[in-house]
Amino acid sequence: MLSMKLSKYIEVLNPVYVILKIVPDTSIRNYNSSTIAKAMNYTYRSITQRIQKEEKKLKWKLETPAKISFFIDIKRDDVSFYFIVPERHLTLIIEKIMNTWSKVAITIVDGINPFSTEAVKYQLKYDKEDAMSLNLDKKCNEPLNGILNVLDVLEDGDRVGIFYNFVPIQQKGWRQEHQRTMDKLKKNEFIDKEKFNITYILKTGAMIILDLVQDFMDTLGEFLGNDTKSKNLTLAEVAMSSLILEDTKKPTSATISKKDATVINTQILVISESKDKRRQNNTAIGVCESFSTINGDNKLVYKKIKAKNTFYINDFKIAGCEESKCSIEECQNFLELPGKELLSQHKIIKKIDALETKVPEQLRTGIIRVGMNMYKGVPSRVYQTEDEELRNTIMCICGPNRSGKTTYIANIVRDVMENGRSVILPDFCGKCELSDALAQVIPADKIINIDCNDLLSVQGFGFNELVPHDESMEARYICAKKKSAKLKELINLINSGESDLEGRMERYLEFAALVVFVSDGPVNDVFKIIKDHVLRHKYIDRIPAELKETMEEYVEELIEIDEIGKGVDNKGEVIGTKMGSTSAILSRIHRLKENAYIEKMLKKDCKDNINLIDAMQGGKLICIRMSTDMFGTNAEKDIFVCYWMVKMWAALQKRFNDVETENLTQVVILIDELYQVKNCEIYLTSILSQIARHRIKIILSCHHLAQIPVIQNEMKSALCSYTFIAGSNKKNFMAMKEEFADQGYELEDLLHLKRHNALNLLAYEEGYWAGITKLPAPIKKIV
C-alpha cells in the first residue's frame, strides 16, 4: 500500500502578523475607540470561510483563526503603543485607527523585544459572568491614567507591559447566555464567573444553610399557626441584598444593553520585569489595581500566572490566561492613547506635536523650496507649485525675530535666481541687513544695488522706463499720458490720511504733467509749472506743433490757474498763479520734498538711471537700499517706498506690453515688514489682483498678519500661500482658521512647532495643502 502525507491534501495557513507602532498626538480623544473593537470582531471568519479548495487539484487550504492585539510597553524613559494585526486585515484596522485618532503616526516595525521568562505575569478577568458590564464612561481616561502612574516608581531596567488580546467570535448564542445570567439574578442565584474557588464555595454553603434555617422557621411557624404567606423577605434574600452579597442589585443600563451588543473574547495580561523581584511583583499588582477605576456591575480581578511560559505577541491566545466576553463598548476602556493632559504629565512619551499630512505629487518637485515634510516616518521635499496658472500667486511668510525668516528668504532668492528668475527687494528696514544677507549667498555679478542713501549717486526721480515705443508724436503722447497717470497715482498716495485729490485739482496735476512730459521734461518741472506761471507758459509754447490740437483742451483748463492782472499796468496779463486752486497739490509736493534724498533726486536727470526692465529681464537681484537713517519720520519712508513701488509697477506693465509672453522672466518682488509703510500697503492692495498675470510673484514677510490688515482679504482672494514659522503669533492661525480646519489643523499644531519648523498653507492645482515642514538648511556663503 502507498501512503501520502496529509500535507499533500491539506495545507495549513497561519496568519502573518504585522506590528504597527502608534505615536499619539496632543489632540487625542478616546471617545470612539470602540469602532476599532467593532472592526476587530468584523474580521471573524467561520471554519467554512477559512477552508478553500484549489482549482483542479485534490488539495485544500485551511486558514487558522486570527486575533488582533493592543500592547502598551512601558519603560522608565519610554512608553510605546502597538497593534498586532493580521496582514490580511491591515488596511481595515489602519483605516479604523485613523478614523478614531486622525493625527497619530503609524509605522510598521519589525518586532518588539520579548520579556524574559523571569518576568511576572498576571491575568485580568471578569469577576462576574460575562453578561455583567464594566463602567462605560466615554469621557473617563481610565484605566490608562492609573496605568501610566507606574512611571513614577519605575527604575532603570524596569519594564511593564499591558497586553490586550482580542479574539473575534461568532455572536450566535450570546443573547441566550446573557438572558440566563439575568434569570439567575431574578432567582437570587450567584453569578460569580469562577465556580471552583473558596469564595464561591463558602457563599454557596452559606446560602444552603440559610435556606435550611428558613425552612425550619417556616415549619415551626406553621406549627404555631403563624401566617406563612407573609411577603417579608427571607433570610437568604436579606443576605443576598447585604453589602457582602451584592449580586441582586439592579443591573445598570450598560449591563442591560450588553445583551444586544457585539462581544469579543478578550484576554488581558500584565507583565512586569525588574532586577528587584519585590518591585517587579508590586509594580504588576499596582497596574492591575488601576483597572478598579472602571468597575461597574462587573469588575476585573487579577490572578498570577505561575507557569514560566514564554509569551509571544503573535500567539493566537495567551497560554494560561482566561477569556472574558467584552462588549465593543467595554473595549473602549482598553483601546486608549494618552491625550493632551497625560502627554503633558508624562513628557517622556513620544508624541506628534502636530498633524502629519501627505504631500501631493504636484508639490514634490519645483523651484522654490518650502522645506522637508515628514509623513509616517517618510521624508519628502516640499516646493511651491510651478503650475502655469499658480506659480505667480502671492506668498506670505510670518515669524518672530530670530525664527529663521532671513535664512528662509535667502533660500528662496537663491532658488529663483538659480533658475534664471529675477528678484526686486525694496529694502527699507534698519540698515538694509536683508540686502547684506542676500549678498552673502548670491554672486556679486548677479546683484544690482541701488543705494538711495548715497547723495552722489542717487537715481533721478522719474519714470525713465516709460519711453515711446517709436518716434511718432502719437507714441510720445501715449507715453506722456502713462507718465501722468503714474505721477497722479503717486501724489494721491502722499495723503497723510486725507482722501485723494478732488477732481479739479487732480485734473490740474494731470494736465501739467502732460504739458511737461510731451516735451520730455522732468517730474520736477511738473511741480514747478503748477506754481510758476512763466515756466508754465514756456512749456505750453514748447508743445510740438503736431500735438497742439490734441493738447488744446488740456492747456485751456490748465491756464485756469493763471492769475490775471486787473491793474492799469497789467490788465489782462498773467501775473501769477491762483494758489487756492492748487493748494492741495502744493501741500503734497511739499511733503514729497521734505525728504533730502527725494529733493536731491528731483533735481537730478534720469538719463543715468538703471533701467528696471532690462535688469528684470537679466535675471538679477535688484536691491533698492533705503536705510532707516534716510528718513526723519515714518511718513517720509512711506512716501519714498511708494515712489519705488509705483515706478516698479510702471516698469512691469511696460515690460508686459513690450516683451513676448513666453520671453517674460518671472520677477519676485520681496517686501519685508510691509506694515511700516501703510500707504504702500494700500497701493499694493489695489494692484494685487493684476500682478500675477504680469509674471510677478509677491513675497511678503512680517511678524504676524495683524500687522497688514488692509491687504489680508485681497491676499486670500489671490490664492496666497502662507508659511507660519515656529513661534508665530496665534493670531496668524486664527486669521486662517477656516482654511486650516478644512485640512484638519488646529491652533495647537502651530503652537507645538519645533524650532525652524513651519506650518504651511500652500495653494496648488487642487486647492490648498496644509502641512508642516522643516525649513531648508542655510545656504553656504559665497567667499
Image: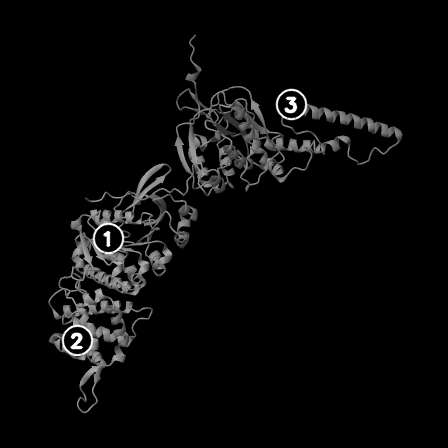
Element under label 2?
Answer: helix
Q: Earlier in the sequence, mark 2 or mark 3?
A: 3
- Which residue appears at 18% of the width and 88% of the height? 572
Dot 1: element: helix
Q: Is residue 82 left or right of residue 420?
A: right
Q: Badge 2 is on which residue?
A: 550
**Front residue (pair 45, 212):** 212
> Do the CB atoms of the residues marked 1 and 2 lie less than 8 Å apart?
no
Secondary element at tag 3: loop
Mark toward the start of the polypeptide (1 vs 2) = 1
Which disc, if any, is residue 197?
A: 3
Q: Residues within 10 Å of mark 1 (few under 14, many from 20)?
A: many
Which residue matches tag 1? 435
Marks 2/3: CA–CA distance: 115 Å
Marks 1/3: CA–CA distance: 84 Å
Position of residue 34 measured from the top left corner of the image (x, y, whole percent): 52, 38
Mark 1 vs mark 2, foreground winner is 1
Residue 198, image x, y percentages: 66, 22
User: Is 234 situated left or right of 489 in this image?
Assistant: right
